[in-house]
Amino acid sequence: MRRRAISSIFSTVLFAVLIACLPTATRGQSLDSVLNNTDKAKLDLLATRAAQKIRGAQLTEKPKVLVIDFFRGSVGTSSCLGTLLADRFSESLSNFSRELTVLDRQLLKDYLRKEWTTLGDFHSNEASLQLGRDLGAMGVVTGSLVEENGQIVLKVHTEGFGPLNQTADSFDDTNEYVRLSETQELKVMLFQQGPNYAREPDKIPEEPGILLAGTGGAGMPTCLYCPDPSYSDLARTAKFQGVVVLSLVVTPEGKADSIYVLRGAPFGLTAKAVTDVRSWKFRPAQKDGTPVPVRVPVEITFGLF
């Protein structure tokens, strides 16, 4: 794990909070309005085949299933279309199999919002499965969307209902898939980023007397004791790698105060980063030779090094 200050974080759009693709109450209806009847039938059939695959694992208990937002490609790129299709697929899966308990996807959205994290954090089999199990599922359904020969191909993958899949690509040719018509409306949704629950830096309330580090004549604070936060057990199990981005005030006494999460990480890492950073010690920033309170961004990278 490593950390670094980001001097340009207040101008970057990396951590912008995107408005959800469509209002929650109208998502299913809006997606249905741009899908033709053939494509709707294909999605329903895909859900049926996925249910059959899960039932085929001959489980000893009724499985609980969570559908994760479908990515554009297989590398964790979120997509508005992927979110909407996952919503509809989850509903179909629930409707077509009484032998499964399909968890409400609002649980996933609430989790992402609570942790200030992004869908891209769950692109691996291990991370997606651990997330599902944290939320009460036995296993998860993930998916990928790609353009191919004038169509949009949706592949779905089941994970956790039997031995773990050890293939390098979660979305290989052994998975169930359908080909959807590539209309202009669907193509726009495909390349529109899905929900991002990180926080905009400019949403931090105004703080009289607090300067931005490196601006207005204020210098930068220097870390004197800033050890990297350690992994949580869940993050290690999920083989998670990602970042937590915080914004904090370094006081004239060199302490970390008024900590805001700009971008979090799952599996307890957000809370762990905030707690550990409170123990950091700094040489305070100065202005005209006097220590002053400054707000500074800090990025903490969690990786399996």
Image (cartoon, grey):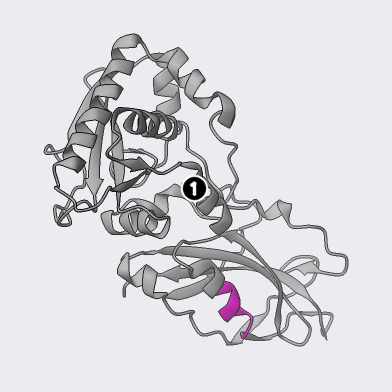
Residue 97, percent from left and from top: 28, 32
Q: In this view, does 56 lie above or below 255?
A: above
Out of 179 and 90, give the one closest to the viewer.
Answer: 90
Residue 225 figure quarter:
bottom right
Q: Residue at x 48, y 69 (%)?
A: 269
Residue 121, percent from left and from top: 41, 55
Q: Can residue 283 be seen in this view?
A: yes
- Which is the main secondary structure of the residues drawn in magenta? helix
Residue 184, percent from left and from top: 41, 15
Q: Which residue is drawn at 14% across and 52% down?
A: 167
Amino acid type, mark 1? Leu
Quadrant where the C terminus sits is bottom left
Relative horizontal placement of residue 194, taking residue 261 as reference (left or right): left
Q: Residue at x 44, y 17 (%)?
A: 32
Q: What stretch is highlighted in magenta?
A: 273-279
Q: Name the residue under label 1.
A: 107
